[in-house]
Each structure stands twice: as structure tokens, then as C-alpha cells.
Image (tube, helix red, strand yellow):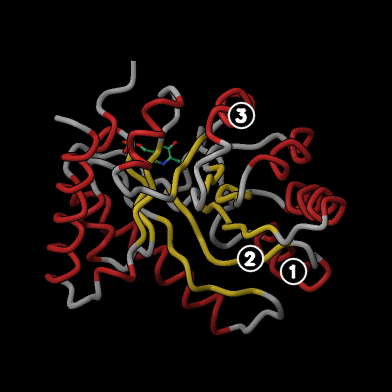
């Protein structure tokens, strides 16, 4: 299957899942996760109309970015764990960071964005399943509270919502309760009306479970395999 055909198919599946949940399909963004794939494949997806891309490593994207500089309107998001010492580079090459998982990282990104005169959109990554090996803020943690309270001083960041990778289950239905938890957490945070915190985005759903995520309120599904095929 070509990237063009894959994109058409996943867009149709998103629309069908949205319809089942009584949602407007245009309220769900499609991110093409291009990690490990070369710049030519990203260009191919762009030509097929794709505009939002996700990459999980600063170094990998720094190498591809120069070959993609002419793709007007393409938006590249960092979705992988970021070490705070790579913050400046990340702010330089990405349009958004969807994987902010500590106050320290948020402060570093804020300083780097301020220096470059940018307003950086970010999402807070939540470790919704409480898995030891996974990055992300614990839902009920002091760290998450401190980050939300610090938001007014992080003037070069725009906190737009939450992101999660739920524990893996072979059956996509297994992810449903985690997606629901993230949605509820978003509502809880929004109800606190933290100054300068916007809680409009819920980035959740990957190739094997995105339809369930759409049914549970996802505003951005992140698809790699379903668009580009198996990673090598
Ligand atoms: C790789 C990755 C994806 C895409 O995974 P697929 O299963 O290939 O769709 C989505 N989100 C994050 C954070 C990833 O690292």
C-alpha cells in the first residue's frame, strides 16, 4: 500500500470512529509519526496532503530537517522523551513539544523559547498506566501540580493539553479505560482554571488503538505504522 492510500484509509477510519461517537471528524488531527523513516517518505506524505508530523528524537530530526525546509505549512512535533540539555536544539527545530514530563524540562524549554523569541506550544505527557519504564507525569503527582502552578511564569510556553501512551494491550479495547482516565484528568485540570493553562488537546491513540481513542475524545491521533508501514 502506498502512503497516499494509507492516509486515505486512516482518515476514513477516523471519520467512522468519530461518527460512532457523534463527533465532528474535523476536530481530530492526524499526526504522521515519521520516526526512523527517511525525509523522502515525509515528503511523499506531505505531497498527499499530510501536514502534522511526529518525531521522537532531536538528533534524528536535526539530520532530516534540512531536506524538508521547503515544505511550507508542515508542522513537526517532538513526541519522544527529551533530555533537558537538548532543549535549545528542540525549540530550534520543532514547532511543538508534545512530551513535556517535568517542571525542569518545562523551565528549560521556556528559557530556550524566550531566547529565540518563540511561543512554544506544549503538551504534558502523562504516564496514565503508572508504568515504571515509561516517561510521563503521574496523574496525581506534586510534579504535575507544580508544573501547572508554574504556568503563568512560563511565558514562552503555551500549555495546550495532555498526551499519553497507555500500557500495551493486544486488544485495542484494553486501552479504552486509560483513554477515559486521560480525558477525565483533562476535565479535572481544566476545572481548576490554572492561569495560562489551556486544556483543549488530548493526544492519544496510535496505529493499533486509534479508533478507540477517537471514541474516547482524542483530538490528535499519532500514527506511524498505519501510514508508513513497519519500522525496520
Ligand atoms: C512511535 C510512536 C507512535 C506511533 O506508533 P505506531 O504504533 O507506529 O502508530 C505514536 N506515539 C509515540 C509517542 C511514538 O513514539
Above or below, comparing residue 108 to residue 33 in the picture: below
Local SS, label 3: helix
Q: Is 42 situated left or right of 67 in this image?
A: left
Question: Label 2: which residue?
Answer: 159
Q: Residue at x 28, y 66 (%)?
A: 216
Residue nearest the viewer, comparing 114 with 196 = 114
**SS at mark 2 in the image:** strand
Quadrant of image for the C terminus: top left
Mark 1 / mark 2, whichever is N-terminal: 1
Q: Position of residue 198 (x, y in %)?
A: 59, 74
Identify the mark nearer the N-term, 1 or 3. Answer: 3
Q: Residues within 10 Å of mark 1 (few under 14, many from 20)?
A: many
Q: Is residue 224 above or below residue 29?
A: above
Name the residue: 25% across, 27% down: 229
Q: Position of residue 187 (x, y in %)?
A: 47, 77
- What's the CA distance linking mark 1 and mark 3? 33 Å
Q: Are marks 1 and 2 in contact (CB under 8 Å)?
A: yes
Q: Check the image and report above or below for 56 versus 201.
A: above
Instruction: Judge depth for marks 1 and 3 and give the one in front.
Output: 3
Amino acid at each position: 500500500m502506498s502512503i497516499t492510500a494509507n492516509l486515505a484509509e486512516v482518515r476514513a477510519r477516523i471519520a467512522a470512529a468519530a461518527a460512532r461517537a457523534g463527533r465532528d471528524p474535523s476536530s481530530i488531527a492526524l499526526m504522521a509519526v515519521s520516526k526512523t523513516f527517511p525525509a523522502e517518505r515525509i515528503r511523499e506524505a506531505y505531497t498527499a496532503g499530510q501536514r502534522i508530523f511526529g518525531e521522537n528524537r532531536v538528533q534524528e530530526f536535526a539530520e532530516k530537517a534540512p531536506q524538508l525546509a521547503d515544505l511550507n505549512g508542515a508542522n513537526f512535533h517532538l513526541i519522544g522523551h527529551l533530555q533537558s540539555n537538548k532543549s535549545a536544539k528542540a525549540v530550534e527545530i520543532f514547532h511543538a513539544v508534545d512530551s513535556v514530563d517535568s517542571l525542569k524540562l518545562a523551565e528549560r524549554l521556556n528559557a530556550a523559547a524566550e531566547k529565540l523569541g518563540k511561543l512554544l506550544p506544549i503538551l504534558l505527557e502523562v504516564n496514565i498506566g503508572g508504568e515504571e519504564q515509561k516517561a510521563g507525569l503521574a496523574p496525581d503527582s506534586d510534579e504535575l501540580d507544580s508544573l501547572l502552578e508554574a504556568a503563568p511564569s512560563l511565558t514562552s510556553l503555551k500549555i495546550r493539553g495532555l498526551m499519553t501512551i497507555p500500557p500495551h494491550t493486544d486488544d485495542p479495547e484494553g486501552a479504552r479505560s486509560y483513554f477515559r482516565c486521560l480525558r477525565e484528568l483533562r476535565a479535572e485540570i481544566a476545572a481548576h482554571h490554572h492561569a495560562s493553562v489551556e486544556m483543549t488537546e488530548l493526544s492519544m491513540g496510535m496505529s493499533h488503538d486509534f479508533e478507540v481513542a477517537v471514541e474516547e475524545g482524542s483530538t490528535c491521533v499519532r500514527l506511524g505504522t498505519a501510514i508508513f508501514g513497519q519500522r525496520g
